[in-house]
Image (cartoon, rainbow, N blue to C red):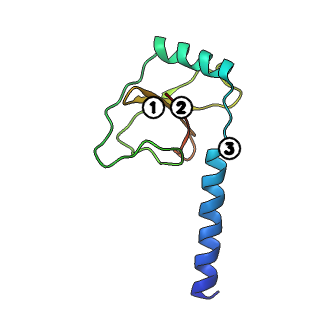
Amino acid sequence: MTLRSTITAFALLAGTALATAQTVVVTPEQEVVVREYVKTNPVVVERPSNFELVVGAIIPDILKPGELADNTLETKYQYVVIDGRTALIDPETRAIVHIMD
């Protein structure tokens, strides 16, 4: 495999992963449930100075997210509150999949 092919394959895989991270849909009703759960079970963390809170970002290992209750959303996510915003995290990849203001 040439270097160009390797780079192209990597770019396609990275783009697919990012697109997948951005396709999580949380309905307004689900957001209400998540907000209520987070309000009673807060996991507030301080944002590291070199970390940008955006969908697709991988949370650093120093941040310890909480687990959403099984009945909160159809898919199991973790969460943290950073800078007053709740971030839903894919527990397998540690990628932020949804941010609620």
Q: Is residue 101 left or right of residue 62?
A: right
Categorize mark 1 by other alpha carbons within 10 Å: few (<14), some (14-19), many (20+): many
SS category of the residue bearing label 1 = loop
The answer to which quarter of the image holds residue 89 is top right
Question: What residue is at 64 percent from the left and 82 percent from the top?
Answer: 5
Q: What residue is disc 3 on?
A: 23
> Which residue lies at the image location 65% right of the left edge and 53% below the top edge?
19
Q: Quadrant of residue 70?
A: top right
- Density class for disc 3 (Cα within 10 Å; few <14, some 14-19, many ≥20) is few
Query: Which amino acid, by three-letter code, is at mark 3?
Result: Thr
Label 2 neighbour load within 10 Å: few <14, some 14-19, many 20+: many
Q: Residue furthest right?
A: 74
Identify whether 7 is placed above or below 54.
Answer: below
> How far across and how far down the image is residue 88, in percent?
54, 33
Going from the N terminus, do you reach mark 3 or mark 2 first?
A: 3
Q: For mark 2, what is the residue?
A: 78
Q: Secondary structure at mark 3?
A: loop
Asked if the residues shown at circle 1 and circle 2 are in contact, with their CB atoms under 8 angstroms apart, the answer is: yes
* Residue 75, image x, y percentages: 68, 31
**C-alpha span from label 3 to label 2:** 17 Å
Q: 56 left or right of 12?
A: left
- Which residue position is annotated with label 1? 65
In the rendering, at what x and y percent does residue 57 appear? 48, 48
First along the sequence among labels 1 and 2: 1
Q: Please indicate whether residue 41 sits to the left or right of residue 8 in the image.
A: left
Q: CA distance from mark 1 to mark 3?
A: 21 Å
How far apart marks 1 and 2 lie (CA) works out to 6 Å
Q: Are marks 1 and 3 in contact (CB under 8 Å)?
A: no
Inspect the image, locate mark 2, and give the three-letter code of the amino acid beneath it: Gln
With respect to residue 55, does 45 lie above or below? above
Provide the secondary structure element on which disc 2 rests. strand
